[in-house]
């Protein structure tokens, strides 16, 4: 096993072979390896190997974040095998959703692997300062991902069991949202304190880029957690100031050279293959490599009726596309055309619209997750006769442009209006081809809303392992309900002169909102095992 691991070290930080993580796999009794596993420094590499196997699987699969479809940027197919996604799109989720269960399972797999490291890696503490430092950074990585997953779990279910021990017990009571957030913050503070500014050895650094979680990523994550803690349902508004302060630490560190992070000069590069492994805007991502069979679901999420067919788990909501500011960012976010029967057409093209022969998919579609044949850019002009179900595109968890937006929003929501908030927000806007906002021209609330909108456009349609997808922003501002009511009306939208379209996935008029729709039901199988999982 160690020989195999050494052969992988020079590859990217990705999913690893199952032999390295057998002791962390789920089984009916939730048993793990012996607690005295740690005997040498190399064992730290092995357990991180196992942890990142679980992290990469969770980050790559859309099943790991199925609740993202409740956002106003995403929709799905009106039929086909997309019912689990449609349930979230309509805010009518059932407990028997298979993808819902996988969202639960994938997060707790990461937590289980992290708990093992946090509880036992300290056995290697001793007289060797270098090994002691490695133990600390190993535990810090585990703490980061544990906190990350508890945040995501609470976003989907509100109250979940906090499990900090090795065994995955089936009778742990659920914790309140506040208790979960306090655990998340505690874990992230460990990560912030003990992770390096820059990794120095493979596989955690490649080509001068951090491929594992680092101090800057931990700080940025704390900034968004604080921003979320100030919002719904907690409403601890004092955390807006803390969010601004933490985001500014990352921005200042980037500006003064402590961190290497910087914006790419053109938006199309953000999700391009060319910058897949050398993107200085990325604070944290998951990387994949087909050579060691690590790629997971990094595929072209394109309409199923275009030439070559597609997967089409997700596509863009029409209103969001309509309101998206014109410019190079929009051009790089959505496919400019759709290949239908050998002819490039606008996405809304459908000579049979409104009849039984209408196209099964008629929505704008996103380019971010698409890639071509190995090592090439996706070309929308070729349809989907390229690439495949698996690929090597990195899934970007945090980008610097997001931190700029979080800082400006947090400043505004805390009642501030300082010029630097405008400066960093305008860095994002200028790249998007938008006019800068004059400093001081907005009220604090208007500044916050401008930054909120800007972040939404920066990450539109992107849910692949993201810390802060559009749904999470809407959640903390309690705006899912407003969108639900809009989707019930489902009005026709003029998408071109004289051309009107509406969402194909409709919310029945009989479905009535209540705040419980902000959360999903517990997966049926897990609720049967743990009597505490009740609404």
Image (spheres, rainbow, N blue to C red):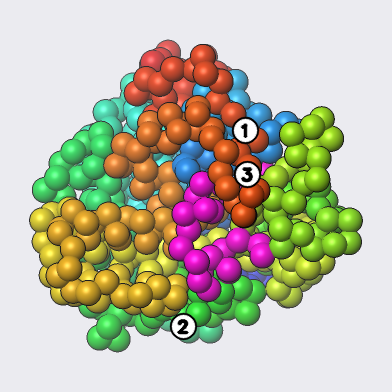
Taking the magenta stretch, the answer to whether it contains residue 331 is yes
First to last magenta residue range: 313-336
Q: 402 above or below 75?
A: below
Front residue of 417 and 243: 417
Q: Residue at x 11, y 61 (%)?
A: 416
List x then y, in percent, for residue 47: 50, 56
**Label 1 CA crowd tier, 10 Å (few <14, some 14–19, many 20+):** some
Q: Residue at x 56, y 63 (%)?
A: 333
Q: Nearer the viewer, residue 220 or 490?
A: 490
Q: Does residue 107 lie above or below 383 as drawn? A: above
Is there any visible trace of residue 202 in the rendered image?
no
* Numbered disc in front, either 3 or 1: 3
Instruction: Please check the rendered image and state whether residue 316 is part of the magenta-colored stretch, yes or no.
Output: yes
Left/right placement of residue 518 relative to residue 31 reads left
| Residue 428 image position (x, y, % from top left) | 37, 72
Specify the quadrant of the image occupied by residue 150.
top left
Instruction: Estimate the spatial distance between the alpha carbons at disc 3 and disc 1, rounded to whole Å.
Output: 16 Å
Mark 2, Cα crowd under 10 Å, few <14 / some 14-19 / many 20+, is: some
Q: Is residue 45 left or right of residue 436?
A: right
Residue at 83% over, 55% down = 340
Q: Which mark is residue 505?
A: 1
**Quadrant in which the C terminus appears:** top left
Q: Earlier in the sequence, mark 2 or mark 1?
A: 2
In the picture of the structure, the residue carrying the numbered disc 3 is 500
Query: Real-space Cα distance between discs 2 and 1?
Result: 37 Å
Above or below, 522 against 399 in this view is: above
Marks 3/2: CA–CA distance: 35 Å
Which of disc 1 and disc 3 is earlier in sequence?
A: 3
Q: Which residue is mark 2?
A: 265
**SS category of the residue bearing label 3:** strand
């Amino acid at each position: 096993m160690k020989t195999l691991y050494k052969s992988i070290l020079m590859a990217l930080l990705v999913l690893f072979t199952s032999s390295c993580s057998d002791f962390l796999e789920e089984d009916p009794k939730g048993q793990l390896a012996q607690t005295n596993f740690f005997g040498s420094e190399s064992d730290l590499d092995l357990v991180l190997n196992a942890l990142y196997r679980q992290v990469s699987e969770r980050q790559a699969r859309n099943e790991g974040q199925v609740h993202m479809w409740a956002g106003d940027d995403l929709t799905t197919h009106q039929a086909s095998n997309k019912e689990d996604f449609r349930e979230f799109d309509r805010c009518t989720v059932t407990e028997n959703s298979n993808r819902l269960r996988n969202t639960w399972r994938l997060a707790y797999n990461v937590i289980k692997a992290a708990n093992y490291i946090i509880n036992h890696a300290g056995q290697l503490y001793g007289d060797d300062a270098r090994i002691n430092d490695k133990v600390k950074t190993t535990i810090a990585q585990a703490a980061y991902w544990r906190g990350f997953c508890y945040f995501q779990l609470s976003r989907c279910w509100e109250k979940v069991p906090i499990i900090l021990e090795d065994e995955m017990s089936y009778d742990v009571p659920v914790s309140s949202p506040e208790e979960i957030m306090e655990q998340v913050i505690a874990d992230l503070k460990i990560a912030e304190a003990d992770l390096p500014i820059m990794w120095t050895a493979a596989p955690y650094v490649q080509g001068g880029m951090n491929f594992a979680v680092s101090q800057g990523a931990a700080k940025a994550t704390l900034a968004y957690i604080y921003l979320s803690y100030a919002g719904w349902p907690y409403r601890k508004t004092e955390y807006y100031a803390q969010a601004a302060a933490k985001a500014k630490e990352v921005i200042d560190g980037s500006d003064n050279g402590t961190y290497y992070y910087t914006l790419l000069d053109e938006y199309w590069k953000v999700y391009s293959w060319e910058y897949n492994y050398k993107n200085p805007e990325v604070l944290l991502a998951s990387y994949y490599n087909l050579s060691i069979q690590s790629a997971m679901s990094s595929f072209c999420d394109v309409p199923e009726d275009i030439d070559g067919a597609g997967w089409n788990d997700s596509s863009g909501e029409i209103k969001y596309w309509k309101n998206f500011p014109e410019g190079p960012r929009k051009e790089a976010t959505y496919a400019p055309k759709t290949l239908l029967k050998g002819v490039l057409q606008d996405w809304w093209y459908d000579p049979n619209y409104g009849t039984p022969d209408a196209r099964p998919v008629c929505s704008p579609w996103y380019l971010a997750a698409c890639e071509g044949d190995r090592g090439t850019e996706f070309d929308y002009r070729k349809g989907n006769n390229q690439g495949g179900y698996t690929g090597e595109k990195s899934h970007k968890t945090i980008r610097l442009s997001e931190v700029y937006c979080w800082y400006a929003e947090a400043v505004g929501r805390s009642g501030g209006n300082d010029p630097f908030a405008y400066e960093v927000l305008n860095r994002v806007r200028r790249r998007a081809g938008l006019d800068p906002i004059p400093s001081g021209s907005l009220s604090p609330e208007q500044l916050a809303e401008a930054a909120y909108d800007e972040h939404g456009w920066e990450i539109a349609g992107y849910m692949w392992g993201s810390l802060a997808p559009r749904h999470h922003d809407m959640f903390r501002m309690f705006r899912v309900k407003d969108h639900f009511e809009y989707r019930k009306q489902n009005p026709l939208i003029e998408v071109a002169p004289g051309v009107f379209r509406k969402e194909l996935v409709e919310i029945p008029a009989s479905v009535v909102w209540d705040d419980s729709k902000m959360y999903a039901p517990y997966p049926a199988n897990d609720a049967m095992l743990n009597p505490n999982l009740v609404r």
